[in-house]
Image: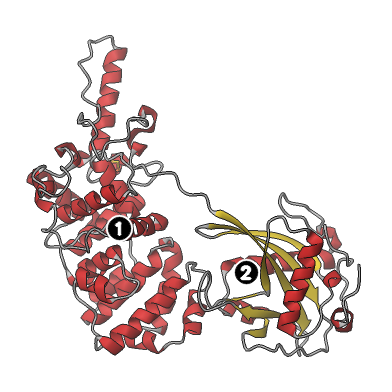
Amino acid sequence: MSKLRAAAAGGLRRSGRRAASPAGKSRKGALLRGAGAPASAPAPPPAQHLFSDPAEIQALRGNLLAWYDKCKRDLPWRTLAATEPDADRRGYAVWVSEIMLQQTQVATVIDYYNRWMQKWPTLQALAQASLEEVNELWAGLGYYSRGKRLQEAAKKVVSELDGRMPRTAELLQKLLPGVGRYTAGAIASISYGQATGVVDGNVIRVLCRLRCIGADSSSPAVTDWLWDMANAVVDRSRPGDFNQALMELGATVCVPKAPLCGECPVKKQCRARHRVEKELALASQKLLGKPTPVPDVEDCGVGDCPLCPPAAEPWDSSLGVTNFPRKAAKKQPRAARTATCVLQRRGCHGAPEYLIVQRPSSGLLAGLWEFPSLPVAQDLQEEKQREVLADHLQAWMGQPVAAGGLQFIGEVVHIFSHIHQTYVVYSLPLDGDVTLDPSSPQSRWVTEEEFHASAVSTAMKKVLKAYEKQRGKESNPSMGPKRKRGTKMQRASSTSPGTQLSLHAFLRAPTAL
Ligand code: SF4
């Protein structure tokens, strides 16, 4: 859901046709009438794909809101939006929830949201936080630039807007960095009652099914129509609740794979459902040997309809309502490979400590902490891989590191939105009574507890887990070895498992293996 929400916003940014506009502008009139777009705009799609009957729109609003009042989930940001009397705090509370929800499931967000609002209950509090604190709290939520941008925007509101949140979708989008058309519409409608629609992944799915829209829903043209539609149907007196109800319907009833049409509050207004019902009726008549009328369950019948499925991919009866929505095939994530090393020493109380280093302040996982890591070519030979990693460690530690001392742990795969990342994990255990002073302020030794409290990515937590698992097997050989597909445990290690090599053995001039 959340990825689609981002896709919708991204598509809109790409299209760049209009800024968010309250309902009542752009092609709303055409949507309500099913005709009459401005002369310069392309001809509107046939009425079948639009909301052309005011009575039907009223029924849709009434049914959806009644269902929402009865069935909505109890979520902390909804409570704040409904009870917070201070308009700026209310807008801020909704804003934080919308940014967190953009790429993440509701169930995951709740805990992060509560901790965030407890720590920074106001824009002013957030504006005073450090990026390190923001990254620490955000750790594990993914898409880390969201937290950074949120904090930068909070600083701007405090320093340039006198701490006052803009009150309309247009101003929110214009004035706040990182606030796109969806987020602006959500904040304005939920916090300030502006009658403006929203389009996220859930709304796309529901609208496409309600109006049998089978054209690529991520294309700029279709996205524009969906925004117009969302603006046309949004309830004028309860826009925030209506928008949340539409999204809630998509998240809980009109779900991607097995929608619960029988329980749906708007099934009477759903054209995809009508189409399925008609097909079933025709099929049963045929079975009974009754003469079947000419089916009227075809696409809208207008050649080159911009909203019907492409001719090459017609309606598939076996899919039912899930024929909609459709979108262009997703681009495959690119493969990347990174060598990483868990460098461990004994801390002053005997507990293990790990060296972590900070990533650059821009780019992927900006400012986060990780084990010393180095991107490597996909086809780099293992021996060479060890050498470049040893050189990299040397740069952090300021002393030579023997490539042969690196113990191979295994491979850890983590999927980022656009990258299929494989970490080739090594370890380098050091003897206890040594003190290494990393030469850079962007590095530090941490205990396991400190590691988990630091701003580290989920991928690095997986790396540590793989390391600990391997160490557990080494100290308890009865546990292993169990080889899993894709994990080449100890394959390349030249050091016998469990051997704690002395610091001097590692830091002396590299030796040939
Ligand atoms: Fe979605 Fe089914 Fe409801 Fe139509 S009837 S909106 S397909 S759940």
Please report the residue visible at 48 percent of the width from the left and 74 percent of the height from the top.
138
- 495 vs 480: above or below: below
- Where residue 470 appears, as percent x and y from the top left, is 77, 64
Of 477 and 390, nearer the camera is: 390
Give the amino acid type for the residue marked by disc 2 in the picture. Lys
- Where residue 400 appears, as percent x and y from the top left, is 81, 81
- 159 vs 270: above or below: below
- Where residue 125 appears, as percent x and y from the top left, is 37, 88
* Residue 83 seen anywhere in this rendered image of the structure: yes
Of 477 and 174, nearer the camera is: 174
Density class for disc 1 (Cα within 10 Å; few <14, some 14-19, many ≥20) is: many
Foreground: disc 2 or disc 1: 1
* Residue 264 seen anywhere in this rendered image of the structure: no
Q: In which quadrant is the C terminus drawn?
A: bottom right
As measured in the structure, the alpha-carbon distance from the residue carrying label 2 to the one carrying label 1 is: 35 Å
Is 461 left, or right, of 245 in this rendering? right
- Where residue 127 appears, as percent x and y from the top left, is 37, 86
Quarter of the image holding residue 256?
top left
The furthest residue to the front: 40
On the image, numbered disc 2 is attached to which residue?
Answer: 461
How many marks overall? Answer: 2
Q: In which quadrant is the N terminus drawn?
A: bottom left
Please report the residue visible at 37 percent of the width from the left and 44 percent of the height from the top.
327
Quarter of the image where ligand 1 sits: top left
User: Disc 2 vs disc 1: Cβ atoms closer than 8 Å?
Assistant: no
Question: What kind of element bears circle 2?
Answer: helix
On the image, numbered disc 1 is attached to which residue?
Answer: 12
Is 459 left, or right, of 52 in this rendering? right
Quarter of the image holding residue 348?
bottom right
Of 421 and 197, nearer the camera is: 421
Please report the residue visible at 56 percent of the width from the left and 76 percent of the height from the top.
368
* Ligand 1 within 8 angstroms of badge 1 C-beta: no
